[in-house]
Structure formats: C-alpha cells, structure tokens
Amino acid sequence: MAFVKVEKQNKIAIVTIDNQPMNPLSSAVKDELCEVFTDLNSDQEILAIILTGAGQKAFMAGADIKELPKKIGNPHLFPEFMENHEFFDSIDFSTKTTIAAINGFALGGGCELALTCDLRIAEEHAFIGVPEVKLGLLPGAGGTQRLPRLIGKAKAKELLFTGEPVSAVEAMRIGLVNKVVPTGEGLKAALELAEKICKNSPSALMNIKKAVDEGLELPFNLALEREAELFQELFLKEDVKEGVQAFLEKRRPQFQGK
C-alpha cells in the first residue's frame, strides 16, 4: 500500500497514515484505510488497533481540498457521502479497541477520524478542530453527531460554529482526548495503554464496548436490559472461568477470548 502502513506486534496493530507532510484524507488514503480495517476487524489475533499519522506535523489535516472543486454544484453526491459514513462506521463499530495517537494537527476529517476511535491520546503540540464552516461546509463524516455525544452539545456547537481548533491541553479539559503526552511520545503512550488493555479478556472487552456504545443510543431502562444481556453472555464464556480461577489462585489469568 502506498499511503497506509500496518505493523502488528503481539495483539496490537499499528496503522500509520503516510501521506506527508499533512496526511490528508484523499480518496486513495480512504480506500486503503477501508481495506486495512476490513482485514483487521476480521483478524482474530488482533485485540487493539492504534491509528496515527506519519511524521510530527499532522495526524490528519482533513480532507484533500484539491478534490473538492469537482464536487461543487453536483446534486448527486448523497450516495458518496453515505459511503463515507460506512467507512467511518467501520472504525467506530469495530469490535476491537481503537486508539488514536494524535501526533499533530487533527482537523476536519482528521478530527472526525479520531472521533471514531474509542480513546484518543494527543501529543502536546497537537491542535484539533472542525474548520469546515470556514469553507461554507459542515463536518460531513459524522462530526456533527459524534462530537456533541463526546463533549456535549454546547461545546460542540462552539467548535463547529467557529471552526477554531483547540490545543491538546484544552482538548483534554473538555473531554475530547483522554491524555496529553510530550511531543514524540504519542505512539509509545498508545502502545502502553493498548498493552494494558490487551491483558484483559477479549470477550469482556468486546461486550463492554457494546454495552457502552449501544446503551448510549437507548432509553436508560432498555440500556440496562442490554447490559444484563451482555453480562449474561459472559457467564457462558471460558474467560470468566479462567478469570475467577486465576483470582482465587492469585495468578495472572490467561484469557483466550472464548
């Protein structure tokens, strides 16, 4: 692949967007990412996926603006935009734990890509935002929906209406990222977090993600029912037997995801 590199180590896949210097989300990059995530989502050996950008300037500085002029005035773009949603959803709804290591600008589509991940770690020089309004557009890859669900409606509208990015520190303050680390240490921090997560039961991790993500879209009473269903599922797995036995024997469990 020309623009997306994949490295696997233990149970973790590192996906690097390499379209330097700013790693824009061109059609070619999107196609390659789609292929990569299709493969990784079906890879039973992989439990966590880290998504990052090459270099130190950008995680992803949005869409490739050079591709926009040919779309202006076209009234038949709706199917293409829905395909974009399918691509971003393939990351958002992955059964794997996903972590964005934001190593610079994450703007527009780059911010929206980071929002599809479960967790976000930003290097201290990073800036994150949705500047589409300055082009007469709106974030069309889920940004108007995922951002308010993450940081609240009022703050999301402020970022969407102004188009101004926020610093890594401010992003952490408003809940947009989980952690800020020194420049150059984003991938290391993401790997450390992924390794910690991957020590746990794959079955439990998958059901926790389902419980949180599906529950947020349901009325509270139905969300509790869904949690109970997923909890019940885990009591039929081998992992819970191993986890409880390991606790009683004061040893580290050896989970198999079964």
Image (cartoon, helix red, strand yellow):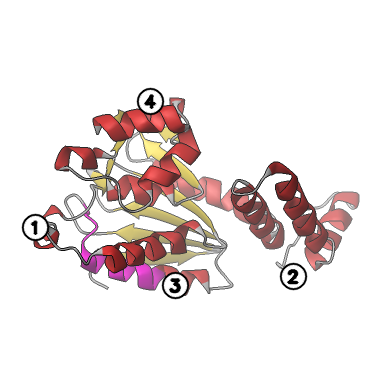
- The CA distance from mark 1 to mark 4 is 33 Å
Q: Earlier in the sequence, mark 3 or mark 2?
A: 3
- The CA distance from mark 1 to mark 3 is 30 Å
- The CA distance from mark 1 to mark 2 is 50 Å
Q: Quadrant of the C terminus?
A: bottom right
Q: Read off the magenta span.
A: 23-36
Few, some or many C-alpha atoms within 10 Å of disc 2 (few <14, some 14-19, many ≥20)? few
Residue at 25% x, 59% y is 18
Estimate the x, y position of residue 160 in percent, counting from the top left: 31, 35
Q: Quadrant of the N terminus?
A: bottom left
Using the rendered image of the protein, determine whether residue 178 is visible from the camera's viewpoint: no
Using the rendered image of the protein, determine whether residue 50 is visible from the camera's viewpoint: yes
Q: Amino acid at mark 2?
A: Lys
Q: Earlier in the sequence, mark 1 or mark 4?
A: 1
- Majority secondary structure of the magenta segment? helix
Residue at 23% x, 70% y is 2
The numbered disc on residue 69 is 1
Q: Earlier in the sequence, mark 1 or mark 3?
A: 3
Q: Earlier in the sequence, mark 1 or mark 2?
A: 1
What residue is disc 2 on?
258
The numbered disc on residue 170 is 4
